[in-house]
Amino acid sequence: MEKRMDASNISINELARKFVDYINLTPDEKLKESYINHVYESEDDDKCIGKFRLLHLFDSTKNNEYLTFTACFFKDETGTQKLTIHNIEKEKLILECTFNDANKSWSAEQNIPDLYLSSITAMATKLKNILV
């Protein structure tokens, strides 16, 4: 992957890009090794993938050796498929995605420069494959 990076002063948008890049660039076998919990059901029946440890990102202000993310697939109150990515250390939602059933692609709810529809769709597909 890339050199270790201190993410203590990184923007949420940059953190989202780093997560998407990590998922898309990591081979499937290694990706399955990077999450530490089994799939679990949240209180809201969300399909959540366990915590992903990104060893190349750390936060020196919190003495973390790596950053940890969770990914949850769920349907909102209207039945729309959603995917959320949270960063544990920063206690922030870094990415919220919506599935477009018409063109079978995922898009980010927030505007993140240089984060393309194809990258988000590839990331969501790889994460979804872990559920199988």
Image (cartoon, helix red, strand yellow):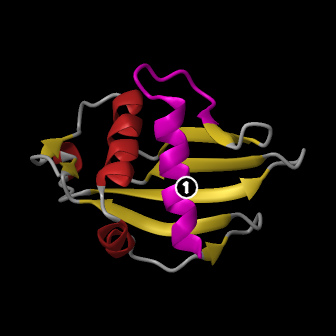
| Magenta region includes residue 110 | yes
Is residue 83 in view from this perspective?
Answer: yes
Judge whether 41 appears above or below 4 on screen: below
Judge whether 1 appears above or below 13 on screen: below
Work out which quarter of the rendered image holds the C terminus and state it: bottom right
Residue at the extreme left: 3
Label 1 Cα crowd, 10 Å radius (few <14 / some 14-19 / many 20+): some
| Residue 76 location (% of width, % of height) | 81, 48
| Residue 33 location (% of width, % of height) | 33, 75
| Magenta region includes residue 127 | yes
Is residue 89 in view from this perspective?
Answer: no
Q: Residue at x 57, y 76 (%)?
A: 39
**Residue 103 vs residue 40: left or right?**
right
- Is label 1 in a helix, a strand or a loop? helix
| Residue 71 location (% of width, % of height) | 53, 57
**Residue 35 vs residue 62: left or right?**
right
| Residue 118 location (% of width, % of height) | 51, 36
121 and 16: which is toward the camera: 121
**Quarter where residue 29 is shown:** bottom left
Residue topped by disc 1: 125
**Quarter where residue 69 is shown:** bottom left
Q: Residue at x 73, y 57 (%)?
A: 74
**Quarter where residue 111 is shown:** top right
Residue range (magenta): 107-132
**Residue 45 vs residue 87: left or right?**
right
Q: Amino acid at mark 1?
A: Thr
Judge whether 57 appears above or below 54 on screen: above
